[in-house]
Each structure stands twice: as structure tokens, then as C-alpha cells.
Image: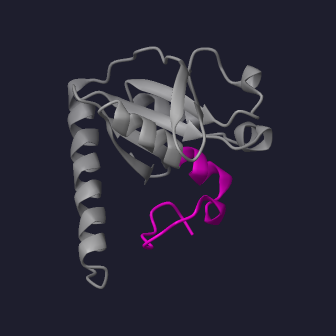
């Protein structure tokens, strides 16, 4: 089961550890006034765990890591930096945070909520890139909602 599946009820023990963290991050983002999507593809070959669109149009990317090995084997994360204004790692309380790069943000999360413990530096997107990613965010969100409303419809 992935976080994009839409059963009536999903218990945390049905989710992979990274998806549990993503769920808490997305709940935190909602409280902060952000809209978020899980498993978003900004461009071919990249898939971010969570992307968030803020109240002023800002774009955040959050990568959820459930273990040291999960982090150490991630070879694509630096490619995500050009697709957001701020970049965060999200981990649980047992994660060894000292291995995460200091020049990125840090969120501690569980399946119910999250907390920003280190803000990410701002690297403002160019206007054309912001427009492209915002449009793709809106299109993805609308398509996901349509699949929830009409799960048998396929293009």
C-alpha cells in the first residue's frame, strides 16, 4: 500500500515507515497553511516524498528518511534542490540527525504530526520554474481528486 492509495481507513501499521513520516509531515504542513502532495514527480527521473505549496506561493520539498541506510543510499536528493525554495529532511525521533547536511532543513515527525527543528535556507525559484511547478502541483492534485471521486475512470 502506498500513501496515494485511498482506502476508507488506513492504520499506521499498514504504511511503510517513510510513509508514516510523510503523513505526519503533511498534517504539520496543513496546520501551517500549506497544501501538500506525496510522491510528486517534478521532472522525469525525480520523485520527491512530499512537496508543499505555501500561502504565498512558496514551494518546499521534504524527503522522508526512515533509517541511516535509507539516507545513505539516496543519490538523487541534490537534484531536488532546483525544484523548491526550501528543502527539508523529515525523520523520526530515533534517526541519527547528525548525518544530515547542515545546509538543509530538518523536521521531526511521526504519523500524527511534525515539528520543524531546523529551518531550511531560502533559495528562491526563478519565476518560470515556480509557474511550471505550481501548475504541475495543481494538475496533480486535481487528477488525484478526480480518481477519488471516480476511481473507475481512466484516460
Relative to 76, is 88 above or below? above
Question: Residue 90 placed where, x, y %?
Answer: 58, 34
Q: Quadrant of residue 107?
A: top right
Instruction: Identify the residue at horizontal 50%, vertical 49% (top origin).
Output: 23
Q: Is residue 12 above or below residue 53?
A: below
Query: For the point 42% across and 70% down, which residue is it?
Result: 6
- Give the left or right position of residue 25, taking residue 34 as reference: right
Figure check: 32 above or below 44? above
Is 44 left, or right, of 97 in this rendering?
Answer: left
**Left or right relative to 104: residue 81:** left
Where's the N terminus, which quadrant? bottom right
The magenta region covers: 1-22
Residue shown at 65% from the left, 41% from the top = 65
From this viewpoint, which residue is outermost toward the bottom? Answer: 152
Examine the rendering and report whether any part of residue 41 can be seen: no
Residue 35 visible from this viewpoint: yes
Q: Position of residue 5 (x, y in %)?
A: 46, 69
User: Can residue 7 be found in the magenta stretch?
Assistant: yes
The C terminus - image quarter: bottom left
Colour scheme? one colour
Q: Is residue 49 left or right of residue 36?
A: right
- Taking the spot 67% from the left edge, 41% from the top edge, the residue there is 74
Image coords of residue 131 (percent x, y): 20, 36
Give the tally of numbered discs.
Answer: 0
Q: Position of residue 89 (x, y in %)?
A: 58, 31
The residue nearer to you, when weighing 40 against 128, is 40
Amino acid at each position: 500500500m502506498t500513501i496515494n492509495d485511498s482506502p476508507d481507513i488506513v492504520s499506521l501499521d499498514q504504511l511503510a515507515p517513510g510513509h508514516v513520516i510523510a503523513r505526519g509531515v503533511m498534517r504539520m504542513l496543513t496546520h501551517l497553511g500549506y497544501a501538500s502532495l506525496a510522491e510528486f514527480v517534478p521532472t522525469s527521473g525525480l520523485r520527491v516524498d512530499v512537496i508543499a505549496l505555501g500561502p504565498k506561493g512558496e514551494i518546499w520539498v521534504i524527503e522522508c528518511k526512515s533509517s541511516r541506510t535509507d539516507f545513505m543510499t539516496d543519490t538523487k536528493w541534490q537534484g531536488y534542490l532546483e525544484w523548491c525554495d526550501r528543502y527539508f529532511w523529515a525523520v523520526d525521533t530515533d534517526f541519527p540527525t547528525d548525518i544530515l547536511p547542515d545546509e538543509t532543513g530538518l523536521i521531526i515527525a511521526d504519523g500524527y504530526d511534525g515539528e520543524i527543528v531546523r529551518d531550511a535556507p531560502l533559495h528562491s525559484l526563478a519565476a518560470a520554474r515556480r509557474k511550471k511547478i505550481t501548475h504541475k502541483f495543481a494538475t496533480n492534485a486535481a487528477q488525484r481528486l478526480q480518481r477519488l471521486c471516480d476511481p473507475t475512470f481512466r484516460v
